[in-house]
Image (cartoon, rainbow, N blue to C red):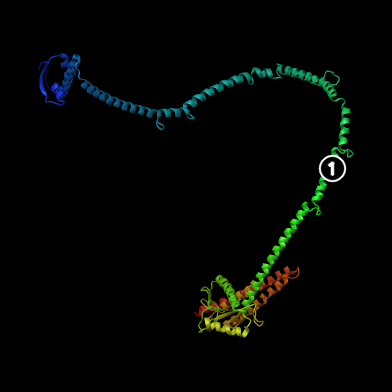
Amino acid sequence: MSDDIILSIQTTDSRMGAEAGGRHDPFYVNLVISDPEVILAASEYAEGRPRTDFLLTALKIGVLSLRAARGVVDGEMVRKEGEHLMEQLGERLNGWRKVFEERVAGSLSHYFDPKQGTFVERVERLVHADGDLANVMKLQVQSAEQNLAKVFEQFIGENSQLLKVLDPSGENQLVQTMQRTLDGVIQSQNAAILQQFSLDNKGGALTRFLGELEAKHGNLNTALSKNMADVVSEFSLDRPDSALSRLVQRVETAQRSLTSELSLDNESSALSRLQKMLEDNHKEQVAMANRLSESLNVAIGQLQARREEAARSTRHGLEFEVSVGDQLRAICEAAGDVVRDCGTSTGLIPNKKVGDFVVTIGPEKAAANAKIVIEAKESASYDLAATLEEADVARRNRGAGVCVFVHSDKTAQAGIPVFSRYGHDIVVRWHADDPGTDVWLKAALMVATAMSVRAATHDKQDAASFQVVDNAIARMRKQIEGFEVIRTSANTSSNAAGKILERARIMEESLLSQVEALCSEVAKLKARQDQES
């Protein structure tokens, strides 16, 4: 094939396109290109579509150039091509900007990253304690120190010329010369100072000072004598205007004022006002005391009336039962027993309410689940026989093996013992307001617990055990009566303390021995009951 290029180009009629404003069917043009430059430029593109596009573009550019040369360039086409060119330029610029930003960011990250940046690493190496900067400064300082040390050693060292000059033991007499010079200067100054304070020197400072003092104040002795006379006159009572006279007048005035303030004759004095205030306060206190006394008298009268009313009615008996119940609950709770109030309910006997409390012995004791009936009475109509009869009724009514009959110490007859056992019944006197009688109630419950075993198991050996219990109760009664001796001794002479201590020691030892005896007998009864069961 020759160097010419045959080209088929599809194109449109530009006039028809401009008139219709749309696309038209292409027309075909067969060209034979023989221009060497065009052939060379077209040969740079591969044969086929790329070369055809290139030649179409070149033809279009040529057409536009020819039209521009003829002055008929299409403005719209230029605008479109310009916009297309600007878009391509913008895309290229954006691409270049992104690449530039990525490269700059990579470079900045490479150098200034806080963790991996070479600049930070380099700065760290520089400013570190053992870094390059520290090493350089250390080398410079060490070099300077060495140089300074050499300079100091040269000028003020042991072998320097300065020390040789200042050495008084050497041949150089500089120090000695300076010392002699200073001594001469000091001596001359001392002489000059002494000369100024000498009265022989008429032009000295002391002479001039005395002259000026005499010129201003005259003769010193005369002035002192005159001033002393003035001072003495100020302390004289003969002159009414002297300082001492004025002081005495003020003291007398203050004394008269103080005397008037402390006088009861003057109603406006401080002492009179104080006395009046104290009298008013005393009157108020007396009035308050009278009102309080009247209130107390009324309250005491009301209380006495209530007590008399309770004594005449059955109310005092109920109050005594409540007190006995409270004391029983306190004792039995500590011992592990159970207290039940049953004074208002009937028992085994029809229509009988005898037996105010029933104590059920705890399961940990020998007489477990055994019952003790408690009857409380605050009545003067019960003698010992009536007491035992009602105690028997109470045992049968409540199904108990032992009865503790508690008499009020305020209403009990003289024949009622303080503490005594009669078969299965225990009679005891107790005062609700006297804590000293609580020991009787505790002892009665202890004895009742020891006695609370079934009657069928009592044999001669048990009878002997109950005899020991009776003896222990009798001795306990005798020792507890010693509380009367303690109360009497505590209210008598100064020897009461010794008597109280001695009596308390004897009672303590005796009560402890009796309690041990009771515990021993209770243990025997428990062992016998276990053997029989």
Counting from the top left corner in percent of width and height, residue 301 is at 66, 72
Counting from the top left corner in percent of width and height, residue 317 is at 60, 78
- Residue 513 in view (yes/no): no
Which residue is at 68% across, 72% downward? Answer: 506
Residue 480 figure quarter: bottom right
Neighbours of disc 1 within 10 Å: few (<14), some (14-19), many (20+): few
Instruction: Determine whether, in the image, residue 230 is placed left or right of residue 290.
Output: right
Q: Nearer the viewer, residue 264 or 166?
A: 264
- Residue 280 in view (yes/no): yes
- The correct choice, above or below, for 216 with respect to 495 in the image is above
Instruction: Determine whether, in the image, residue 289 is placed left or right of residue 51.
Output: right
* Secondary structure beneath label 1: helix
Q: Nearer the viewer, residue 458 or 160?
A: 458
Residue furthest out toward the right: 238
Which residue is at 84% across, 45% downward? Answer: 252
Counting from the top left corner in percent of width and height, residue 352 is at 53, 83
Three-letter residue code for mark 1 = Gln
Residue 309 figure quarter: bottom right
Q: Which residue is mark 1?
A: 249
- The correct choice, above or below, for 13 with respect to 355 in the image is above
